[in-house]
């Protein structure tokens, strides 16, 4: 049987998810795929489980946790098929997920699309996601209702299918991002290169509980590690990808968002290990990011005007946990909307 798709699962301390994930993969109605696991230095028995499991697969074991970006880039290099599905370790795939994404990617009318995104049902958060968009402050917005059109602005790395024949050969995940915003950064640059992302709502994947210390779920103390990566990588994303004009135009909003994050970190008691560490991390990567920025700005085809917009601020359940926090978010949201309308009226007419 000739393999048509490579399904790559990136694992890190994933043993509690592997049984359900592998059972769902074995139950798939589409069988013409190669299964690849890349383990990021797990210490919880993940590798022992994978070695004992009898599923036909290839397993690459990395000696330490090099980050999601590095593992995803390794998957791009190791992929021998035209199509690559990057699959989160804490997922359960619907029986028709692989088939649905593969068939949609092969339709002649979809030649403008390089990535195909499923509908994500997040069981841990009791939410449904239909891809997402880019808020002009550099924050991603998740579509919690099905959009009218098929094209979306971005998709998380939960289970996208990448058509590697349409992905620019020099496009890769940014190793410096490690985790968080790395998928947003990748798909932003993909769209800036003129490629599109299509939502395939008939294809379903179920997202579970995330990774301890890195993920946030309702009722759990906010992780300083997560705060560090999210805030540092957001700044790096803007520095690297936004044009000088856009940075200047939106600078007041960037500064307001920075103040908002500072208040958040103080409130969640992650000021030192989260916020201050993220500022130091941004400074440490500033010059290398500027070099990447120079290379990217020379090759981009589409600017911010056609890539970003205003969307209601959304946060994971439990992040905004009090009436006062909810009020502040709504006020901030109105300020951002008003500013964006002014920008469209004056600069982006």
Image (cartoon, rainbow, N blue to C red):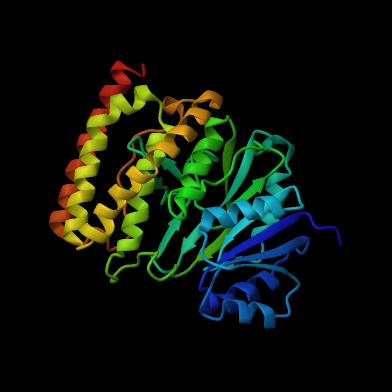
Quadrant of the frame with the N terminus: bottom right
Quadrant holding the C terminus: top left
- Where residue 289 sits, quadrant-wise, is top left
Residue 152 visible in image: no
Residue furthest to the left in view is 324
Do we see residue 327 in this rendering?
A: yes
**Residue at screen point 31% across, 43% down:** 312
Q: Which quadrant of the view contains residue 254? A: top left
Q: Quick check: 319 left or right of 42?
A: left
In the image shown, does 262 or 314 lie closer to the viewer?
Answer: 262
- Residue at 43 percent of width and 49 percent of height: 181
- Coordinates of residue 134 in the picture (x, y in percent): 41, 39
Q: Position of residue 150 (x, y in %)?
A: 55, 40
Look at the picture and state if 69 lies above or below 220.
above
As drawn, 211 above or below 105: below
Instruction: Name the foreground residue: 272 vs 201.
Output: 272
Is 118 displayed left or right of 107 in the figure?
left
Residue 88, compared with residue 161, is above or below; it is below
Judged from this view, the residue extending furthest toward the right is 1
Residue 61 placement (x, y as % from top left): 63, 68
Q: Nearer the viewer, residue 276 or 337?
A: 276
Please name the residue shown 31% across and 51% down the image. 278
């Amino acid at each position: 049987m000739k393999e048509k798709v490579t399904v790559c699962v990136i694992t890190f301390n994933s043993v509690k998810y592997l049984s359900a994930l592998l059972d769902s993969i074995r139950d798939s109605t589409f069988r013409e795929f190669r299964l690849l696991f890349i383990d990021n230095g797990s210490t919880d028995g993940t590798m022992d489980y994978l070695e004992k499991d009898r599923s036909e697969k290839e397993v690459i074991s990395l000696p330490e946790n090099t980050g999601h970006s590095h593992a995803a880039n390794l998957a791009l290099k190791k992929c021998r098929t035209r199509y690559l599905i990057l699959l989160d370790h804490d997922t359960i795939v619907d029986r028709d997920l692989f088939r649905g994404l593969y068939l949609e990617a092969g339709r002649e009318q979809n030649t403008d699309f390089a990535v195909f995104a499923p509908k994500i049902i997040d069981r841990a958060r009791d939410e449904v996601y239909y891809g997402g968009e880019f808020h002009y402050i550099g924050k991603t917005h998740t579509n919690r209702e099905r959009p009218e059109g098929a094209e979306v602005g971005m998709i998380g790395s939960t289970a996208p299918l990448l058509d590697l024949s349409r992905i620019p050969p020099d496009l890769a995940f940014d190793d410096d991002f490690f985790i968080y915003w790395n998928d947003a950064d990748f798909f932003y640059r993909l769209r800036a290169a003129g490629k599109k992302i299509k939502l395939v709502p008939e294809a379903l994947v179920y997202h579970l509980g995330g990774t301890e210390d890195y993920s946030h779920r309702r009722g759990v103390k906010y992780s300083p590690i997560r705060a560090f990566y999210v805030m540092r990588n957001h700044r790096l994303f803007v520095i690297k990808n936004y044009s000088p004009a856009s940075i200047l135009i939106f600078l007041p909003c960037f500064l307001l968002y920075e103040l908002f994050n500072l208040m958040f970190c103080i409130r969640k008691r992650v000021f030192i290990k989260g916020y201050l560490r993220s500022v130091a991390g941004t400074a440490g990567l500033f010059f290398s990011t500027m070099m990447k920025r120079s290379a990217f700005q020379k090759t981009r085809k589409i600017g911010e005007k056609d890539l970003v917009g205003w969307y209601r601020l959304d946060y994971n359940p439990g992040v905004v946990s009090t009436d006062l926090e909810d009020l502040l978010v709504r006020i901030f949201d109105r300020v951002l909307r008003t500013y964006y309308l002014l920008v469209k009226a004056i600069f982006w007419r």
